[in-house]
Image: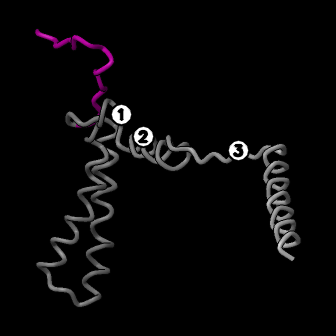
Amino acid sequence: MDVRIPKDIRKYKDKLIGGFTIRQAVSLVVAIGVIPPVWYYLYKLNISMDTIGWLVVAISIPVFSIGWLDIHGMPIEKYIANIFVYNYIYPTKRLYKNSLEMEEYFNVSEKRREKELKLSKRRRKQ
């Protein structure tokens, strides 16, 4: 009897039913569970059967693919969560505003000096 042993033990996944992992079996069941309510709702809207078939396939494929897709060694839900965190929660381009009391003081004093210069020029002209 030959038993296949994977070279990298981290890539090994336990099989549950018929060669499917637990993750794949759950995504298959959820995808199959999504089909009847979507079909029934679209049928009640008097949409043609051809269109209903395409819409059901378009809706169930993303649910079905969750069990099979691994991007960069991560399941797709972890990958999407990482993309969300990287882009929205901790973005690389950070908004930073520096506010120092001395800068505000100098800006106010410069404006005051400008006003005083204008007033002195007006007085000289008179």
Q: CA distance from mark 3 to mark 2?
A: 35 Å
Element at label 1: strand
Q: Is 111 situated left or right of 14 in this image?
A: right
Q: CA distance from mark 1 to mark 3?
A: 39 Å
Q: Is 91 situated left or right of 123 in this image?
A: left
Q: Is 56 situated left or right of 96 in this image?
A: left
- Which amino acid type is marked by label 2? Lys
Residue 100 image-quadrant placement: top right
Residue 74's label in the rendered image is 1
Element at label 2: helix
Q: Residues within 10 Å of mark 3 (few under 14, many from 20)?
A: few
Q: Which residue is mark 3?
A: 98
* The residue stretch that appears in magenta: 1-17
The spot of residue 5 in percent (x, y) is 20, 11
The spot of residue 122 in percent (x, y) is 83, 72
Is residue 5 found inside the magenta-colored segment of the image?
Answer: yes
Going 42% across and 44% down the picture, which residue do you hit?
Answer: 83
Please tell me whether mark 3 or mark 2 is closer to you in this view: 3
